[in-house]
Amino acid sequence: MSVVFLHRPAAVFVGGSRSGTPRYRIIPTVPEGQYNDASRKALVKGVTDAVVRADGGKYEDVAPLVWVFPTEIPDGQWGGRGVIRPLPDIQAFIAGEHERKVGEERLARRRREKALEMLEGALDAARKGAGAA
């Protein structure tokens, strides 16, 4: 399932000056638990390649004008059809009730990753703080 919202501003400014070339900002959003490092990198590359093709220019000229911000929406904050849709519900809707567990596992994996990142950051800060004393 994909939806694209296209916004064409009357002008784009870079460093306070009006840009003479187009700029492309793509913000793909998905429910929490969908991206990992490999999928995020592949998405940025694929979107950049698609924009270069659509622009019709050379990769080395167009790619620097393309910014891609893959974003995960925290579970419980993705809404549609008037209700909040948690990832397991979305997975079941798209792939069938038998796939609900896939959504639960993806969400659990992402939350473990985020918890480990936070703990590693806290340990790093504590070690640096202890070294300064």
Image (cartoon, helix red, strand yellow):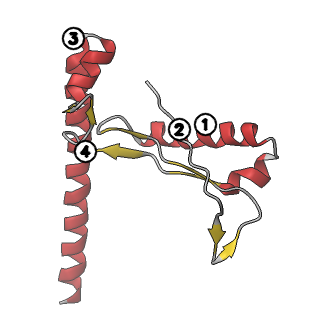
Report if the CB atoms under discs 2 and 1 are less than 8 Å apart.
yes
Q: What amino acid is labelled 4 in the image?
A: Pro
Judge left or right: residue 21 versus residue 114.
right
User: Looking at the image, is mark 2 or mark 4 earlier in the sequence?
Assistant: 2
Distance (Cα) linking label 3 and label 1 = 30 Å
* Nearer mark to the viewer, of 3 and 1: 3
**Could you say whether the residue bearing mark 2 is in a helix, strand or loop?**
helix
Distance (Cα) linking label 3 and label 2 = 27 Å
Total count of labels: 4
Residue 93 has which mark?
A: none
Report if the CB atoms under discs 4 and 3 are less than 8 Å apart.
no
User: Looking at the image, is mark 4 or mark 3 earlier in the sequence?
Assistant: 4
Q: What amino acid is labelled 2 in the image?
A: Leu
Q: Read off the residue under disc 1.
A: 46
Judge left or right: residue 75 versus residue 4.
left
Judge left or right: residue 110 versus residue 5.
left
- The x, y position of residue 4, in whole percent, is 51, 36
Image quarter where the C terminus lies is: bottom left
At 18% from the left and 39% from the top, the residue drawn is 76
**Could you say whether the residue bearing mark 3 is in a helix, strand or loop?**
helix
The foreground one among 88 and 9 is: 9
Q: Read off the residue under disc 3.
A: 97
- The x, y position of residue 113, in whole percent, is 26, 45
How would you rate the neighbour count of disc 2 (Cα within 10 Å): few for under 14, some for 14-19, many for 20 or more? some
* Nearer mark to the viewer, of 1 and 4: 4
Q: Read off the residue under disc 4.
A: 74
**Could you say whether the residue bearing mark 1 is in a helix, strand or loop?**
helix
Residue 43 has which mark?
A: 2
Q: What amino acid is labelled 1 in the image?
A: Gly
At 24% from the left and 36% from the top, the residue drawn is 109
The foreground one among 88 and 120 is: 88
